[in-house]
Image: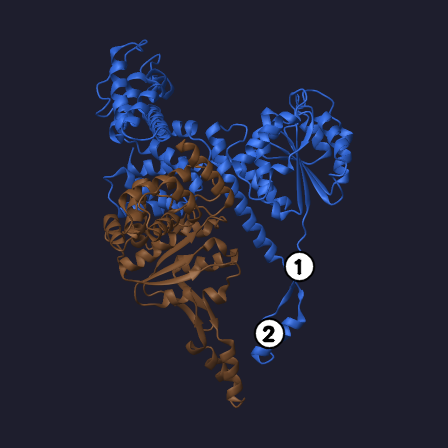
Amino acid sequence: MTTWFESPDDAAARLRATGYLTDDATALTAYLAGALEKPLLVEGPAGVGKTELAKAVARAAGAELVRLQCYEGLDEARALYEWNYKKQLLRIQASGGDQSWSATHDDIFTEEFLLTRPLLSAIRRDEPTVLLVDEVDKTDIEVEGLLLEVLSDFQVTIPELGTVTATRRPFVVLTSNASRELSEAVKRRCLFLHLDYPDAERERAIVTSQVPRLDDKVVAQLVDVVVRLRELELKKAPSIAESVDWARTLVALQVGDLDEATVARTLGVVLKHASDQQRAARELKLASR
Amino acid sequence: MSLLDTHIGFVEALRSAGLSVSLAEGLDAISALEKVHWHDRETVRAAYAATLVKRQPQRVTFDAVFDIYFRRLIGGGVAGDGLEPALGPQDTGPDLERFREALADALASGDQQALQDLAVEAVARFGAMPGRGPGLSSWSAYTSLQRVSPAELMDRLVQGLLGEGLDDEQAQRTAGRRIADFTRLVEGDARRRIAEEKGPEHVADVTVRPTIDRLDFTAARRSDLEEMRREIYPLARRLAARLTKEQHARRRGPLDVRRTVRASIATGGVPLTTHHRPKRPHRTDLVVLCDVSGSVANFAQFTLMLVFALREAFSGVRAFTFVDDVVEVSDSFRPGADVVEVMESLSGQISQAALWGRTNYGRALTRFAEEHPDAVGPRSSLLVLGDGRSNYSDLALPVLGDLAGRARHAWWLNPEHPRHWGTGDSAADRYGEIVPMVECRNLAQLGEFVHGIV
């Protein structure tokens, strides 16, 4: 049994050391997920650092990250394990029929012909592991059923080989964009954390730590504009990832002062819809008049 | 009350407020609490939130209930200690003057702790409502806010912020936000005092509002409407994701022999994976007819927004609004148009839909059938939105019957509770005999319905 973090403060400090700045609730929930050995379901808008949290936990604990990227049509064969059919077929053809069926059967359903996929490999590992199930809302209902067994008991049943149980429970992080409601059964087994846009102070700290070459004054101006953009009714409000991108753009352009002309010129970095850009341009102009 | 009682009571209150908290989650919460220190109230809150709240919209409800069960302080605390609520009017009293000075200072500096203390003092001093006997007194956030009236400090605050080098618009926004924060603190503190006297169960029943997607359109306040509007696009996105998924699941058509045989060459002629021909998706033409008179305007706007946000799922959408005359508004919804602009142009067109300004379903339906005879055909579905309150005028039942007969499907969405259908001037029951009438009172029901017709 691993202790992932000693206390919420320890979690905050160690995540900070890896470059991930948490707020109190995030640090506490990450600590609880480790202490209770429960999966952590992280929800929130795109680009607020959900995936990054899992990576930061892995870095902070010196664990390896096993990632399962979910997509529509993901199935057991690609999430859990698969038998290497082609190799089995070759094996049967190569033996040329001089072996009995039961011997062949025992031969082709062994470790050698098993292709482990992320879920199974995360469970079988002996070293500390962080299992990241990314964008779990993109999968079908069937995969959720599959996750249930893995998440509650940390075991996988392979009919031909028997049940594989985790020797060491991985730290599981599920991320979701809430494009679909997950089933109650999955939610019940997880701790829940909603990551939202940070307050201005924390965002300044994040941008400064990610892009240290940017002037403090420009960072303050940038965060101020981003906060105002989030107050508008936009189709997609800018998130932290976009603020950081914007900061990088400004460094590349060697901007020393974020004036209105620069904002207008580089707005495309933060806003990705044409109507949002028009609206922002209008509202910001109004504000300056 | 023991700690366990508080926990059980808290979980019960959450359940009655609409959060589905299972027994297992309650146990999780207890084991989470064992792992953390209790000296900080926010830690306890975060531990409960991580284990019990699994949907973000419920967080508001959770916070309200948490504040009632795990109170910030008991009685007046340090700030309000020993303050006897003075009876009778004291608007002119020196106390009020002194208090408002202190409040203005705290607002100007934005000191959270000072504001919290002042909120406690405001309720203790100015919010007491004397009862007829001991134990019958109560506390009112409304009274204290009326007496203190922080909104009057707005100008002063703006001036102060301008002095600090903020520009005009920024100062206005900051001032507005701080005053709103203070108002919320006062409301929270009044709830806390009431909970202390009457028991938390009582307050949880009375003051906790439903989550935004369960809130009635007709009961929504102005701020709620804005929040609902922000929910429209996420809701549409969720619906679209669900639809594509379901269509994909049903898409497996007949076996495509050619592709299957080709793929089998890689495995020595054994067809391990089969390939299928895709199915052609079926799409409907949608005609939406909305009542946009005052009482149901919000509801109609939300439905229109949602329908147009999902327009890819239909082969065509035409929208008409009416009060007592009909006007087509399909043009307002360009692809990628701005939400706020659409809302504004919609409310601009409401005046065109009204001749005399009194809702008249009969006249509107007749005009619609006359002016747009081509709109409803055998391939299209008709959707009527409205409460069916027609000011006792002619209902034009045969016209609606004719329209519904021509259309492939027809529905009527009613934002009122079914128990009000057919009461007063509502003709919902009579229209309901011709067109199936569906209750649609909140965003959750609306989402379900729209998903159903696609």
The residue singled out by tag 1 in the image is B279
Circle 2: element type:
helix
Q: Quadrant of residue B47?
A: top left
**Of the pair B433 and A222, the residue shown nearer to us:** A222
Residue visible at 40% across and 57% down? A152
Q: Which chain carries label 2?
A: B
From what the image shows, is residue A9 above or below residue B204?
below
Is residue B167 in view from this perspective?
yes
What shade does chain B have? Answer: blue
Q: Residue B26 has which mark?
A: none
Q: In which quarter of the image is residue B66?
A: top left
Report, in whole angstroms, how far the alpha carbon at label 1 lies from the one at label 2. 21 Å
Q: Mark 1 lies on which chain?
A: B
From what the image shows, is residue B273 above or below residue B213?
below
Amino acid on which the number 1 mark rests in the picture: Lys
Q: In this view, does A63 lie to the left or right of A132?
A: left
Q: Residue B263 has which mark?
A: 2
Is residue B84 in view from this perspective?
no
Q: How many marks?
A: 2
Residue visible at 32% across and 36% down? B5
Amino acid on which the number 2 mark rests in the picture: Ala
Nearer-N-terminus badge (1/2): 2
**Of the pair B329 and B2, the residue shown nearer to us:** B329
What shade does chain A have? Answer: brown
